[in-house]
Amino acid sequence: MSETAAIAHGRLRRWGRRLAPLLVVNVFYFGLLIYPLLRIWELLAGSLPGTPVLLAIMVGPLLGRLSYEFFPGTATRWLSGAALTWLGICFLAFPLVAGFELLRLFLPLPPQTWGLILAGALTVLGMAAFTNAQLVRTRAVQIPHEHAPDGLRLVQISDVHVGSRSGRFLDRVVRKVNALKPDMVVITGDLIDFRDISSEELGSLARIEAPAWFIIGNHERYVDVEEICGRLTGHGIHVIRNGTARHGSIQLIGIDDAEPKSQVRRELRKLTPVSDAYRILLYHRPDGAEDAAAWGAHLMLCGHTHNGQIVPFNFIVRRIFPRIRGLYEVDGMHLYVSPGTGTWGPILRLGSRSEISLFTLGPLKSCQEDA
């Protein structure tokens, strides 16, 4: 191969690496989020919308989402949230339209009738998902271990996503946490997902009536992580970053979120387990459980998965994180994966529920998890 050909080949490969992710994003955006609504519109109206409406449907939600990034403020934040919820409704429309394309081969109903059925089903699903996203349940889990403090009540909240959700939602979560009268509280990441969330909006955290610890998730890394940690510290929240903390007979280990699956193993090599303590590892995503068990953790608390948040997305998430929600036993260690207390992006939940997790520790006979 000549030098000129080699240079041209190298440029093509670089362009290919750049274009491939862009192609995937466009297929996802237009195929899963835009096409379903256009198909329903076409069935109802008999034709596609005119150019102005078509452009608004195709580009409007994306511009709405990006508005906060360029012009941060209360109005653009709510516009961004509305755009994300709209895109979530578009995602709900995809399986409905996909199912319609199959059913119409066997049920030759008039196009407008199909359009009315799809629009009605999407309205019902959207309202159900939005309502479900407002509800936060408490799941009680009993964790047995001979070294665990008998009867200690530990509350976990995770993935609240202030930014996508409001400070009022966080205040409601804090009130529910206090009503459980915990001995300690842990926040396993993604408390915040927008930049420049003010200390005032996070003020309800100062009203948590038990010692509380926080570890960062991926969304804190995406925005202003150092500033976030400073605001939380100002509200009395203990931040653990790749280190440990002691609370009575409990050793808490907090590890920063990172993309490599080796993150837990790599950071635990730098830390020493306290031999006479009950050791609780906090890590945002359910990776590295085997490494945590080998190090000597007794309980590992994670979040991140949202249990898929919206069906059928949960099928994709389960392929990435097989331990998607609930209690698992890994090499003698208990692992609990929270489905999240809030919602990311769309204020929608379908096929999953928001949760505050309440753990009761002690020398019990067996693990128990309420339905």
Image (cartoon, grey):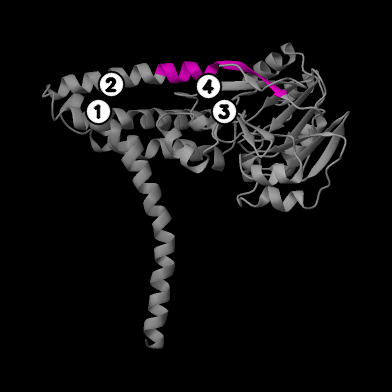
| Labels 4 and 3 touching (C-beta < 8 A) | yes
The quadrant in which residue 338 appears is top right
Q: Which residues are magenta?
A: 127-143
Q: Nearer the viewer, mark 1 or mark 4?
A: 4
Q: Which residue is mark 4?
A: 353
> Looking at the figure, which quarter contains the C terminus?
top right
| Labels 1 and 2 touching (C-beta < 8 A) | yes
Residue 223 at x, y = what percent? 64, 43
Q: Can the viewer see residue 87?
A: yes
Q: Which residue is mark 1?
A: 40
The quadrant in which residue 280 appears is top right
Q: In the drawing, what numbered circle is on residue 339?
A: 3
Among numbered discs 1 and 3, the one appearing first in the sequence: 1
Mark 1 and mark 4: Cα distance apart in space: 28 Å
Among numbered discs 2 and 3, the one appearing first in the sequence: 2
Residue 322 at x, y = what percent? 52, 38
